[in-house]
Image (cartoon, grey):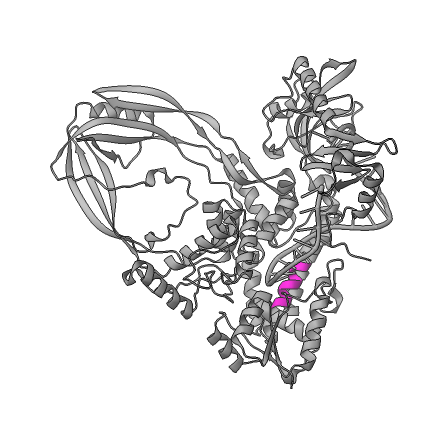
DNA sequence: CAGTGAGCGAGCTTCCGCTTGACTT
């Protein structure tokens, strides 16, 4: 009489559930999928109905062994993986890998981790839904076909190590196309009128003209009309308004809000949330659901009643808006609403607070507002000025939580209360301003706003949003960057004391913080894919195949037929592209004619990055080459900027009979002398560094280097004790060795260094998951 | 922290979704 075995996906979940079930149940976790297509093999037999070969993943061997043992002695095995496509497949893979018997294997599902839900699930077991499993297999195999057939084309035609896929390639496309919109964008300006009235007693009233003027002339004409005019309140209108709380967090909205309010990159948000989840503080953090369990809603309600009063509570049920949501879990919420703060460090505490507030607010009453609009007539012209104010009559959920937006145009939003006014009241104009404003280009994506966009399009899943962003950055398709703004002039006309003055002002515009910019590689790869594989990288591709997966899941379509149809149109395109030459895939751009030589200047993407070239390969005089600098894009670099690149590296002068060279390297501008490098400050232009400055820098660097070496040894010239960024360390040939706390760096002997070096393991490669062939 | 940019070819790279730890410069 063995126990019953329940297998779930996550160990934290297993622990919670074990607490709900009696002694007769042992709850274990599979740690997600246990089998998959191996990484180092295509593993799909195209000829044989796309038969996949699954392997138990290397890091799951122990898990499978352990589960198999437990299953063998269990009375009943309950497969309790998530209630969605992937979860069904996990159960199926488990039944295969663990060689379970149909007779004592049950499939159970629940969408919330509450005692009731679990017990209910145990009372309603079913079998594995093989149609749903097949939908997952179709998804898996399609992704493998696309990824593993497209990527090698990129290696051959563009650069090794590149990758393409159903999700990542669309993400890159979004960033590239947004950049093109921005490049194409032309700002137009208009003049906005703001009036300030003096109400006496130190009080003022701010009003605006609802429409803007297109030209400075129009604005000036208007202001002229206003000279000496009388201003009267013609109408006062008060309207009730309300605000409604946002639903509790999903993975995507949590990432967005943590990005806006806490400046967290999406990967940090996920790892901090993971810690809170493992500590039992929050519900599962990879979810696309906005639902809360009835228990959670009740608990939120009593917490709200206790802290703020029962008039603040309002039970709400939200509906998901995103395409393809599978809703296998609850929304992200605190496990216990009475815990108002939790977390081991400030990051955890701040994220918890955000989650707590958002979930609590989602069950709170609307905020009741009163909006007042005052219309102000001008005696000399029919145009009306408008002043708006807002009063909160009942705070409702605003007591706890205010959602932020991506909109940067928020400066006008601080509507306060209006001072007491009455119809017919005459107003005393203090000042009227016509300020020139400019239209803005569409915003560049942040990590989080790109995730939002992907989710809206139904591309990717909660568990892959953060990894997708990491992948496109790692492949160097996009870069996360901040850029300083540039100064821009604008006009301001001020009417004061019956006279109009014109001022030329300047403002900083176009500053960007942590935005995603496409790289040259990203642009070239994207254009290649768009040209040769338009269907696969189409924005609606995922939506279309998802529809077909749904048909497979309901048993209407056979999965091998669906994959066959796809492959029959996809693979010929792959064959076709193998014919094209690299030069066609990576087309050169003609930037312009070099006035000095009369030759054409080209922009190209080489194996080592983007470069410009003057002249042709075939000509007798070989072409000159120069690499592009960070942030320069091949597709819009100007001829001037391209020619500028040929001025570096440049000989600045000489020192100790050796030349000093200034150039720009991978880490920024530098000067080189006698084989040694000195970095220049970021704002220092290597084109204008003088010989004197350069020599000074070289000498400074020498002094620094002199302090760097603590000890050298006669036994081996390749061994040093030196000062590094993180303190003293031993450099033993190629190995860097940390010095233990009980050793004094100055007193280390050669023997000791050698001993320490031998103890430290060889540096591992960046790819720790090396496969053995 | 170079100079490279064509093409050949050994041997490498690559997908998406489900999970959690190892790893340090």
- Residue A400 at x, y percent in the picture: 36, 53
Q: Is residue A655 above or below residue A349?
A: above
Q: Quadrant of residue A611?
A: top right
Q: Is residue A729 above or below residue A260?
A: above
The reply to whether residue A316 is in sight is: no
The C terminus of chain A sits in image quarter: bottom right
- Residue A84 at x, y percent in the picture: 55, 68
Q: Quadrant of residue A334?
A: bottom left
Closer to us: A77 or A411? A77
Identify the residue shown where x is 54% and y is 60%. A279
- Residue A156 at x, y percent in the picture: 75, 46
As for residue A753 lying within the magenta part, the answer is no
Closer to us: A635 or A296? A296
A432 with respect to A362 (left or right): left
Furthest toward the left, the residue is A424
Report the span colored magenta. A136-144
Closer to us: A747 or A207? A747
Q: Main secondary structure of the magenta part?
A: helix
Give the number of callouts: 0
The N terminus of chain A sits in image quarter: bottom right
The reply to whether residue A655 is in sight is: yes
As for residue A141 lying within the magenta part, the answer is yes
A492 with respect to A623 (left or right): left
- Residue A654 at x, y percent in the picture: 74, 14
Identify the residue shown where x is 51% and y is 31%. A484
A242 with respect to A331 (left or right): left
Closer to us: A169 or A304? A304
Identify the residue shown where x is 46% and y is 40%. A442
């Amino acid at each position: 009489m063995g126990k019953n075995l329940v297998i779930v996906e996550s160990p934290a979940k297993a622990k919670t559930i074990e607490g709900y079930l009696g002694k007769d149940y042992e709850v274990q976790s599979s740690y997600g999928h246990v089998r998959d297509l191996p990484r180092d093999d295509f593993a799909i037999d195209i000829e044989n109905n796309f038969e996949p070969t699954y392997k138990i993943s290397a890091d799951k061997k122990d898990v499978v062994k352990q589960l198999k043992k437990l299953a063998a002695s269990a009375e009943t095995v309950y497969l309790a993986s998530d209630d969605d496509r992937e979860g069904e497949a996990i159960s199926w893979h488990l039944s295969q890998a663990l060689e379970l018997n149909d007779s004592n294997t049950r499939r159970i599902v629940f969408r919330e981790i509450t005692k009731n839900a679990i017990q209910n699930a145990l009372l309603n077991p079913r079998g594995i839904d093989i149609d749903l499993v097949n939908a997952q297999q179709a998804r898996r195999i399609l992704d493998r076909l696309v990824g593993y057939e497209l990527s090698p084309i990129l290696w051959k035609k563009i650069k090794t190590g590149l990758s393409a896929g159903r999700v990542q390639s669309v993400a890159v496309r979004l960033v590239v196309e947004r950049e093109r919109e921005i490049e194409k964008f032309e700002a137009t300006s208009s003049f906005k009128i703001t009036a300030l009235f003096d109400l006496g007693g130190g009080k003022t009233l701010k009003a605006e003209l609802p429409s803007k003027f297109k030209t400075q002339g129009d604005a000036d004409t208007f202001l002229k009309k206003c000279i000496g005019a009388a201003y009267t309140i013609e109408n006062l209108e008060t309207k009730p308004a309300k605000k409604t709380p946002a639903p509790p967090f999903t993975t995507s909205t949590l990432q967005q809000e943590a990005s806006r309010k806490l400046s967290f990159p999406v990967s940090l948000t996920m790892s901090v949330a993971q810690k809170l989840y493992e500590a039992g503080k929050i519900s599962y953090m990879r979810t696309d659901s906005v639902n809360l369990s009835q228990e959670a809603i009740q608990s939120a309600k009593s917490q709200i009643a206790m802290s703020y009063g029962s008039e603040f509570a309002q039970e709400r049920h939200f509906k998901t808006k995103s395409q393809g949501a599978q809703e296998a879990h609850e929304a992200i919420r605190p496990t216990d609403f009475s815990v108002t703060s939790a977390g081991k460090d400030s990051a955890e505490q701040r994220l918890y607070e955000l989650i707590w507030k958002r979930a609590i607010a989602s069950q709170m009453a609307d905020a009741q507002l009163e909006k007042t609009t005052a219309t102000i007539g001008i005696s000399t012209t029919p145009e009306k000025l408008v002043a708006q104010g807002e009063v909160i009559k009942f705070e409702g959920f605003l007591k706890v939580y205010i959602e932020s937006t991506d909109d940067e145009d928020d400066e006008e939003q601080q509507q306060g209360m209006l001072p007491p006014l009455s119809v017919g009241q005459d107003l005393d104009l203090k000042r009227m301003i016509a300020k020139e404003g400019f239209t803005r280009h569409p915003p560049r994506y942040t990590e989080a706003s790109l995730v939002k966009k992907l989710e809206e399009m139904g591309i990717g899943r909660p568990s892959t949003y953060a990894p997708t962003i990491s992948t496109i950055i790692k492949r160097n398709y996009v870069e996360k960057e901040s850029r300083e703004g540039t100064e821009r002039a604008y006009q301001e006309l001020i009417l004061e004391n019956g006279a109009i003055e014109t001022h030329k002002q300047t403002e900083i515009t176009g500053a960007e913080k942590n935005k995603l910019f496409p790289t040259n590689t990203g642009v070239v790869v994207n254009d290649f894919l768009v040209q040769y594989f338009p269907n696969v990288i189409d924005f609606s591709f995922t939506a279309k195949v998802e529809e077909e997966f749904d048909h497979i899941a309901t048993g209407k379509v056979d999965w091998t037929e669906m994959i066959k149809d796809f492959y029959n149109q996809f693979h010929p395109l792959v064959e076709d592209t193998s014919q094209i030459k690299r030069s066609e895939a990576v087309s050169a751009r003609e930037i312009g004619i070099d006035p000095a030589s009369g030759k054409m200047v080209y922009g190209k993407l080489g194996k080592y990055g983007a470069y410009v070239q003057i002249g042709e390969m075939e000509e007798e005089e070989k072409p000159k080459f120069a690499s592009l600098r960070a942030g320069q894009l091949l597709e819009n670099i100007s001829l001037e900027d391209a020619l500028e690149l040929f001025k570096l590296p440049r000989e600045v002068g000489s020192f100790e009979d050796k030349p000093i060279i200034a150039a720009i390297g991978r880490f920024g501008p530098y000067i080189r002398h006698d084989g040694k490098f000195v970095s220049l400050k970021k704002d220092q232009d290597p084109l204008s560094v003088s010989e004197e400055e350069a020599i000074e820098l070289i000498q400074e660097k020498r002094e620094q280097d002199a302090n760097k070496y603590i000890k050298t040894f006669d036994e081996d010239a390749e061994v040093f004790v030196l000062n590094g960024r993180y303190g003293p360390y031993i450099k033993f040939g190629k190995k860097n060795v940390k010095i233990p706390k009980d050793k004094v760096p100055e007193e280390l002997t050669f023997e000791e260094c050698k001993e320490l070096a031998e103890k430290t393991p060889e540096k591992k490669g960046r790819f720790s998951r090396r496969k053995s062939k």
